Image: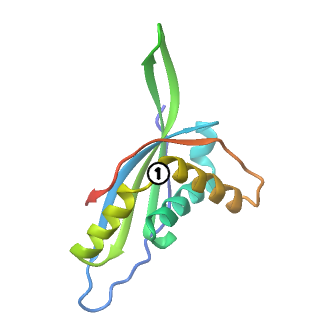
Amino acid sequence: DRRLYGAGDFTIKPTVNQTILRAGGVATLVVSDPDKFVVDANAKAGVQKGLAKKAGVADASVMVMLSTFESRRLLGRQLATKKVKVDYVIEFVGGTTEADTLLATLLAIDTTALATEIMTQIETASGSKTTYTVTVETFTAPTAI
């Protein structure tokens, strides 16, 4: 079962002599209810805003696509665990210096701190009505796209 849902809409408009750059990466989340999570607008907003805050960019600079997938691991027998894949794109105005700064910031992101920020942003977006247990299992720094 693969579902794909997105959040975010790029609104950056360059001025004269500015270049818009895009970089994309992937994160894997372990959440309490993956199927509900990927269709929950508050969860999508929480992931988008949490990543934006940790990256030090505006919310509108981040777009996320959420999908579920099954991961198998062997512990005496094969167990299937459903997880959430986050494909993200960060759009920003700048050049090599700005790209290097963003990359350094993203490489320094602590997965536990990112998970906490995502949960906080979900609670804020939902008015504390929606909560999930979120663990960021993997987070890859973006590459230019």
Q: Determine whether 131 is above or below 22 in the image.
A: above
Q: Give the labeled residue for mark 1.
A: 110
- Residue 100, horizontal then vertical, whole percent: 26, 68
Residue at 23%, 77% in the rendered image: 95
* Amino acid at circle 1: Asp
- Residue 87, horizontal then vertical, whole percent: 40, 50
Q: Which residue lies furthest to the bottom in this view?
A: 16
- Residue 28, horizontal then vertical, whole percent: 45, 41
Residue nearest the viewer, comparing 28 with 41 = 28
- Residue 44, horizontal then vertical, whole percent: 57, 55
Q: Which residue lies furthest to the top in this view?
A: 76
Residue at 47%, 8% in the rendered image: 77
Q: Residues within 10 Å of mark 1 (few under 14, many from 20)?
A: few
Dot 1 lies on which element? loop
Relative horizontal placement of residue 104, taking residue 68 as reference (left or right): left
Which of the image's four quarters has the C terminus?
Answer: bottom left
